[in-house]
Amino acid sequence: MTTTTVALPHHAVEGWHQPSRGVVGMACLIVAESAIFIIFVVAYIFYIGKSLTGPTPSQVLDIPWFASICLLSSSITVHFAVHELRVNKVARSAWWIAATVLLGSIFLGATALEWYDLIYHHGLTISTNLFGTTFYSLVGLHASHVIVGLIMLMLALLFAIAGKVTQHHAERLEVLSLYWHFVDAVWVVVFTVVYVLGR
């Protein structure tokens, strides 16, 4: 019995790099969080139109175009933040992070104003009817993820301003950007289900 040794091409061995633990970890987190969002989205879709009392979505919901544009635009700014840090332009990266924080904060502020209007002007709370329960659960779940993302981005911005961020931290910022892209992608689904299909 003989054994055969297969030699891999040298360039194939050199071209492969072990995936970043941070990226792999974030990918696993995103998969887990996606499962949670799917449950909430399915519940929202299942209960559309089944509320026995008002108000209904068509009566109280306005499509948040401006807030949505701000949030989706923040995916572009965080991408540039990572790019600038990779080429060692820390100051420019900090500006892009600041822009991302600003856009995310505008979105969160718009969500807070929407909730204030729904609660105090239309009487829609989480216990009003099935629509209120599923709406606040789904949109609130997304808003909580935006808050977490903003806290992390603000910390990154503070470290950058303090001069503690270098080119070597680009991979960590990229991991954070993956989470932020996920938050934006989820909003596309939430926006479609709640403000388009649900109305």
Image: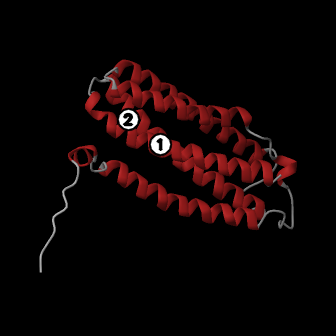
Q: For mark 2, what is the residue?
A: 155
Residue 48 vertical placement versus 111 (above, below): below
Label 1–label 2 contact, CB within 8 A? no
| Three-letter code for the amino acid on which mark 1 is drawn | Gly
Expressed as whole percent of the image width and height from the top left, the position of residue 175 reads 39, 43
Residue found at x 44% / y 39%: 177
Residue drawn at the location 36% of the way across and 28% of the way down: 158
Q: Which of marks 1 and 2 is nearer the N terminus?
A: 1
Q: Which of 140 and 21 is in front in this view?
A: 21
- The residue closer to the viewer here, 167 or 59, is 167
Q: Quadrant of residue 35?
A: bottom right
Q: Is 195 positioned to the left or the right of 95 in the image?
A: right
Question: What is the secondary structure assignment of the residue under circle 1?
Answer: helix
Count of labels in the image: 2
Q: Mark 1 points at which residue?
A: 149
Dividing the picture into quarters, in which one does residue 34 lie? Answer: bottom right
Judging depth in this view, the residue of 153 and 28 nearest the camera is 28
Identify the residue at the far front of this view.
1
Residue occupying image coordinates x 28% and y 28%: 167
Q: Where is residue 16 in the image (x, y as percent from the top left)?
A: 28, 48
Residue 147: x %, y % from top left = 51, 43
State which quarter of the image contains the N terminus. bottom left
